[in-house]
Amino acid sequence: MATSRCVVIGGGIAGLAAADALERAGSVEVVVIEEGAAPGGVIRSEVRDGFHVELGPFAFLSHAPATMEMIERYGLMDEVVTPSPAATRRYLVQGGELVAAPSSPGAMLSSPLLSKRALARLAAEPFVRPVATDESVFEFMRRRFGREVAEKLADPMVAGVTASDCRQTSVAAVFSRLKTMEIESKSVIRGGMAAGKQRRRDGEPKHGLRSFRSGMAALPRALAERTDCRFGVGATSLSQKAGGFTVTLSDDSTLDADSVVVATPPDVSRRLLGSARSGFSTFASVGLRALTYGFRRADVRHPLDGFGCLLPRSEGIRPLGMIFSSSLFPGHAPEGCVSVRVLMGGSLDPGAVTMPEGEAHAIAMDALRRCLGVRGEPLMSHCATWAPAIPRYDVGHRRRVATLQATMPPGLVLAGNLVAGPAVNDCIRDGARVAAEVLTNLD
Ligand SMILES: Cc1cc2nc3c(=O)[nH]c(=O)nc-3n(C[C@H](O)[C@H](O)[C@H](O)COP(=O)(O)OP(=O)(O)OC[C@H]3O[C@@H](n4cnc5c(N)ncnc54)[C@H](O)[C@@H]3O)c2cc1C
């Protein structure tokens, strides 16, 4: 079979996963064009003063077969790190105190966070009629579990995944598993319990968060090593010609291709694809700040015996949440020290991303003092600013993405977290869909 060429624009995890799937198909020569100096996009890991710093994602969930299979194929299984068993608890700040949050729909039934009235309403969840259409996460939670549960949990749940407004965010796009359970099991609580039982029956290990010994960047680095990646040169324009496409690069050179995968952030994709794709104007992105701190263990009163804590807006504390990084992955801090990551910004607080870094540090440190009893100054601090960081997945997102994709000519495929979903796992899984679309066009 003749070899055809596919140019992948963007060397983030979505572009690299698409390149990986295409290369495995064998009949396509793949070139990845990455504007930055390194692969991975927002996935960046550094070590500062002995503390491990993740600038973007800090972990992935191990329940995704495509991710685990990729890790295995790239020989990274021994590099995977599992959270310490002590770090499974998630906290929610309520009335200024850290209270353990329910870890599953079933666990909500015994949660101290909820009033007796809310628990009684929750018990009625299996009898609530399923609704097939998309709705906001807040509306989904209110309808199925009652207003109190929605008011206490929907906001921090969404903030922890997409940093967006739970009253705008699509449940189908961001928490598709909950929607599937509603439709298939007629109840989220029943569906969650059945899935747990099935997993135990099959002898499957309990899934959870994972990272790599040297940080999240280990995966894109491994993918890029086996791919023809050109770093430090960006795509400036894309044009269609007879039988293919021409990509113009920032060094004024051009690349001809039979097919092109556009895996750049949405604002760049919009520019590259041009005004013909008017559907793009319906998408927006949110900015985020990830601030990482290293402290002496003795300078933090809270035992940090968990995953982290979410901060509902109603508490009047500006950051979205905190991750107890070194409790999850003990190798993230030197002996006798701990590290905590604070997330700020999102769709409801864009000012937290544009304010001077010093101001953001002051707000984050104030929250750490109030919530975790931090004393003194940190041994290490770092601020990563992502503006924009993550697309907004508003209600109807999937339908709008489908409309946009329908406007693409054959051979031009849109990838990235806008279409795949917000998680690293979503972007990896979508690689197979992207490759299939490219290959279909070649037939
Ligand atoms: C602070 C933060 C924390 C997160 N935490 C988690 C988490 O814990 N777990 C999780 O699963 N997900 C998390 N996410 C989400 C997840 O990391 C992202 O959704 C995912 O990595 C996006 O991958 P991508 O390839 O679509 O985009 P990107 O990573 O943005 O990659 C796009 C690439 O395109 C390149 N590019 C841009 N313009 C051009 C051009 N003109 N030519 C060539 N290349 C170009 C960019 O340099 C970049 O490398 C987090 C995201 C952020 C920002």
Image (cartoon, helix red, strand yellow):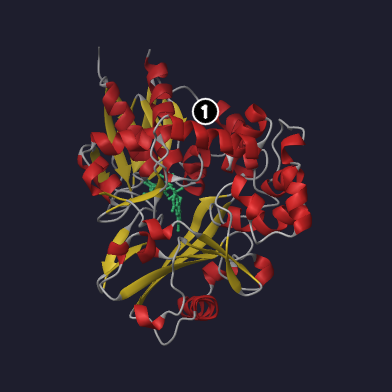
> Disc 1 designates what residue?
408
Q: Amino acid at mark 1?
A: Met
In the rendered view, does 121 fall on the left or right side of 399?
right
Residue 165 visible in the displayed image: no
Q: Which residue is at a point 63% across and 57% down the rendered structure image?
A: 111
- Between 13 and 179, the residue placed more toward the observer is 179
Q: Which residue is at a point 55% across and 30% down the rendered structure image?
A: 405
- x, y (%) of residue 224? 25, 42
In the rendered view, does 253 fall on the left or right side of 152?
left
Give the vertical position of 134 relative to 122 (above or below).
Answer: above
Give the vertical position of 304 relative to 328 (above or below).
Answer: below
Q: Which residue is at a point 61% across and 45% down the rendered structure image?
A: 106
Using the rendered view, name the quadrant where residue 334 is placed: bottom left
- x, y (%) of residue 68? 33, 37
- Between 351 and 222, the residue placed more toward the observer is 222
In the rendered view, does 87 fall on the left or right side of 148?
left
- Between 158 and 46, the residue placed more toward the observer is 158
- x, y (%) of residue 268? 47, 47
- x, y (%) of residue 285? 56, 52
